[in-house]
Image (spheres, rainbow, N blue to C red):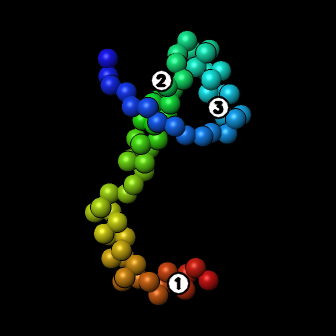
Amino acid sequence: MTAREKFATQADPELLAQMRELAKSEGRQLQSLVEDAFRAYLAAKQTARPRDNVMAHFRDSVKRNGELYKRLAK
């Protein structure tokens, strides 16, 4: 069994009720759903970030074509 660390937080009562109902309907504990939600959130944040080389090209493009972009935006 993996070690667990207790923590306290607060949630919207409606959201918490929905999570508890989902856990009950799936025969799982609430903490299991919370851990899944944490993992999904972290994975989404890690994959949503553009790669460093893509951002470098973007910054270079803005540097070279900034005036053009401003005119096109008008």
Where residue 47 appears, x then y in whole percent?
39, 47
The quadrant in which the C terminus is found is bottom right
The answer, for residue 40, to whether it is visible in the render is: no
Compared with residue 40, is residue 72 higher up or lower down, i.e. above or below?
below
Where residue 58 appears, x then y in whole percent?
37, 70
Where residue 52 appears, x then y in whole percent?
29, 61
- The secondary structure type at the circle numbered 3 is helix
Mark 3 and mark 2 lie on one chain; the one further toward the N terminus is 3
The quadrant where residue 42 appears? top left
Q: Which mark is residue 70?
A: 1
Between label 2 and label 1, give the one nearer the viewer. Answer: 2
Q: Which mark is residue 9?
A: none
Q: CA distance from mark 3 to mark 2?
A: 14 Å
At x 58%, y 79%, the residue is 73
Amino acid type at image mark 2: Ser
**Number of numbered discs:** 3
Q: Where does label 3 land, which residue? A: 16
CB-based contact (under 8 Å), mark 3 and mark 2: no
Compared with residue 52, is residue 23 higher up or lower down, i.e. above or below?
above
Amino acid type at image mark 1: Lys
Compared with residue 49, is residue 35 higher up or lower down, i.e. above or below?
above
Mark 1 and mark 3 lie on one chain; the one further toward the N terminus is 3
The quadrant where residue 50 appears? bottom left
Q: CA distance from mark 2 to mark 1?
A: 49 Å
